Image (cartoon, grey):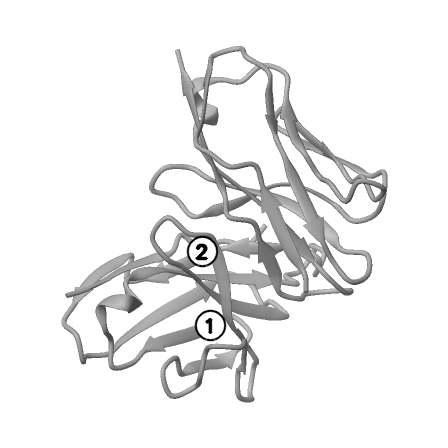
């Protein structure tokens, strides 16, 4: 079946550290890939996406590259801030248009000043 | 992106009762979805809310337990029926295909935090 596996959390880093949150997927076909972020007490927000192999999504200093050969979509940021503390969800979508999202289990990130 | 609101934002309910959650989008959208996020867990799709027809439910979810309405292109409701403590979750609606955006991307409401005693 289709599934998403994320790096287990929680992850705790110091401000200005380099961040990587691993995400790998299993899918029949060629999915679109997404990272969503959930800040404390808020709903999910789309952070970035990539719709085909080798695409790089980026937003707010975060980046993720769609790697078909390793079925991965790792999230990276060069220098994290306290305000990046949140839960991050990797997700995939199969097919064209609006279809259901399959989410990973989420990774809780805490950034200490 | 569209603004998506949900009401109520949270509620505490007694077992055996039902709660209806409303989701309002500020523009017409092609698709609306309802997800559940159980405590400490990821999101699971309950159903796709179809405008003018019955919702499409995912495996493990049934209409009698989670009736859904979508009377127009901007509004949907999810009812959690005959609640038990196991229904305590955050319920989120999402929408895709609003004007000017790709149907590829879903935008989420803030969620409704439900606690069943």
Question: What's the residue at 33%, 53% (across, down)?
Answer: B39
Give the image location of residue A63, x and y in percent. 69, 29
Q: Count how many numbered circles sit on residues in the image.
A: 2
Q: Name the quadrant containing residue A110.
A: top left
Relative placement, left or right, of B94 versus B110 is: right
Relative placement, left or right, of B40 versus A104 is: left
* Tag nearer the camera, 1 or 2: 2
Give the image location of residue A13, x and y in percent. 47, 17
Q: Earlier in the sequence, mark 1 or mark 2?
A: 1
Question: What's the residue at 56%, 89% (across, down)?
Answer: B53
What residue is disc 1 on?
B75
Query: Does the image show residue A98?
Result: yes
Question: What's the residue at 61%, 59% (across, down)?
Answer: A101
Question: What's the residue at 42%, 37% (across, down)?
Answer: A39
Residue B61 vertical position relative to residue A10 in the rendered view, above or below = below
In front: B72, or B56? Answer: B56
């Amino acid at each position: 079946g289709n599934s998403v596996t994320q790096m287990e959390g929680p992850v705790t880093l110091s401000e200005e550290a380099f961040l990587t949150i691993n995400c790998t997927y299993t899918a029949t076909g060629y999915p679109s890939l997404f990272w969503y972020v959930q800040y404390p007490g808020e709903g999910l927000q789309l952070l970035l996406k990539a719709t085909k192999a080798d695409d790089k999504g980026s937003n707010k200093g975060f980046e993720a590259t769609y790697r078909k050969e390793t079925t991965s979509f790792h999230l990276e940021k060069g220098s994290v801030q306290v305000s990046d503390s949140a839960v991050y969800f990797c997700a995939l979508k199969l097919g064209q248009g609006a279809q259901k999202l399959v989410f990973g289990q989420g990774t809780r990130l805490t950034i200490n000043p | 992106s569209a603004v998506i609101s949900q009401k109520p934002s949270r509620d505490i309910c007694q077992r055996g009762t039902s709660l209806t959650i409303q989701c309002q989008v500020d523009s017409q959208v092609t698709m609306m979805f309802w997800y559940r996020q159980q405590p400490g867990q990821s999101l699971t799709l309950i159903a796709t809310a179809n405008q003018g027809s019955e919702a499409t439910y995912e495996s493990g979810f049934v209409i009698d337990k989670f009736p859904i309405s979508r009377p127009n292109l901007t509004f949907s409701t999810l009812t959690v029926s005959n609640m038990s403590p196991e229904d305590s979750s955050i319920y989120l609606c999402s929408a895709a295909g609003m004007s000017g955006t790709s149907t590829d991307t879903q935008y989420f409401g803030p969620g409704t935090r439900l606690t069943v005693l």
